[in-house]
Amino acid sequence: MAQAEDIEAIDRILDGKVSPEQEKAFYQRLDQDQALKALYEQQKFIRNGLEGLGIEQTENLLKKSSVSPQTTKKNRAWLKWAAILIPFIGLTLLWLLPPANQNIADLFYELPSANLERSANDESTYREAMSFFSNADYHHAVEALESIDPGSGTYENSRYYLAHAYYQLGRFEQARNSFINLIPAQNQDIAQQASWFAALSGLKAGISQDQIKEELHSIRDDPNQFYRGRAEDVLEKLD
Amino acid sequence: MNTNYPDDDKLIESLKGGNEKVLKEVYHLLQPDFTTFIVKSFSCDSQHAQDIYPEAFSIVYFNICKGKLSTPMRSTLKTYLFSVGKHLFTRRYRDKYSQTVVNLDTRVWETGQEMVEASLMKKEQGQKLKSVLNHLGPPCRELLHLFYFRNFGFEAIAEHLNENEGRLRKRKYDCLKKLHQMIQEFKITF
């Protein structure tokens, strides 16, 4: 099992933040301790992978911000067609698309991955539900998650995924109520996410904008809330 | 501090601590010269030069965040960017174009090569890590990104996330522990 002190020691070595003596002592220990060696290789892989994904993420961000290429004869012809088609497509979309607040929720909603971690407390129903959830079979996930007993050790998690499954099925009012019930959850991570997703579900369910704004303000003003920046972004869009 | 390139040093510092807006501004600022340089070096289509620009810039930006390119600069930021661009271009279009002009300082040329090779290796490992990372919640992903990509320390992240440093240490460890467990559970090879 990864130990906090070992991970910190590995990070210091990989960042070159140790004296030559400390470095020598670490590598001597590494030669004798196979578990530490395995942890070292894995930590190096995690760091490299996170850095690689960061480079890719920056690249994608910059690509999106790139200016469009200069107009050539070929794409001028396309522009003529675009000038005719875009207003038509735009009007059709306006007619087809749901109201603006619902679109704002779509911009910010992020579906969590199924919790595939296994522990001794896991029950077969919960594992089965997670399997349905990860396969996007939300109808069966709802059935399994609704049947989990409130006394179960996985109850809080199951309610969290149940709320997302409702959301995926377009049952936004049920999703919102389930998220609201999770706001007092023991697990702070779940509690914070519940407040945020309750507001997004509210936008989708067509709850009054004043009510949602009030909820978003309290998320934004909570210094411990992870989603406070995003709440600010949604508030800007609503204004 | 003695510096030969004060303007570049300022750019590096602003990129290092800067936000997305600064990143995009510098990116657009250097784009025309980069394109001209690559087109001149390989006698290539400007579209090909533009295609590799986001990747070249991201590699340089990463090395600034990691402190591998730091102040006082020994050469201009643009020169490092050109060197990375040349190596990237050579790798991608080896069969199509050959380099016509080499006019970069050897040290900068070698640094550029190291940056490109290391970043390609890291991107490959990133692809392997991606499937596992998707199972972590957004708070964990953001926290690890700030630590390992942006290279922020506990103090800076605590300020950025408005969180207590002690809690942050615990959260970082919990996220990493989960990630280590999942790598073993999913039998990811590296």
Image (spheres, coloured by chain):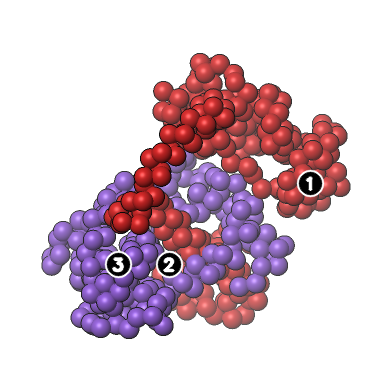
Chain colours: A red, B purple
Q: Secondary structure at mark 3?
A: helix
Q: Secondary structure at mark 2?
A: loop
Above or below residue A73? Residue A40 is below
Residue A211: quarter of image = top right
Q: Are marks 1 and 2 on the same chain?
A: yes
- For mark 2, name the chain: A
Residue plotted at (66% across, 63% down): B183
Q: Earlier in the sequence, mark 1 or mark 2?
A: 2
Residue identifier under label 3: B46
Give the x, y percent position of residue A146: 82, 33
Residue plotted at (20% across, 81% down): B103
- Closer to the camera: disc 1 or disc 2? 1
- Horizontal side of residue A159 vs A53, given as left or right: right
Asked if residue A118 can be seen in this view, the reply is: yes
Residue identifier under label 1: A132
Residue plotted at (70% across, 67% down): B187
Above or below residue A86? Residue B92 is below
Which class describes the residues within 10 Å of circle 1: few (<14), some (14-19), or many (20+)? some
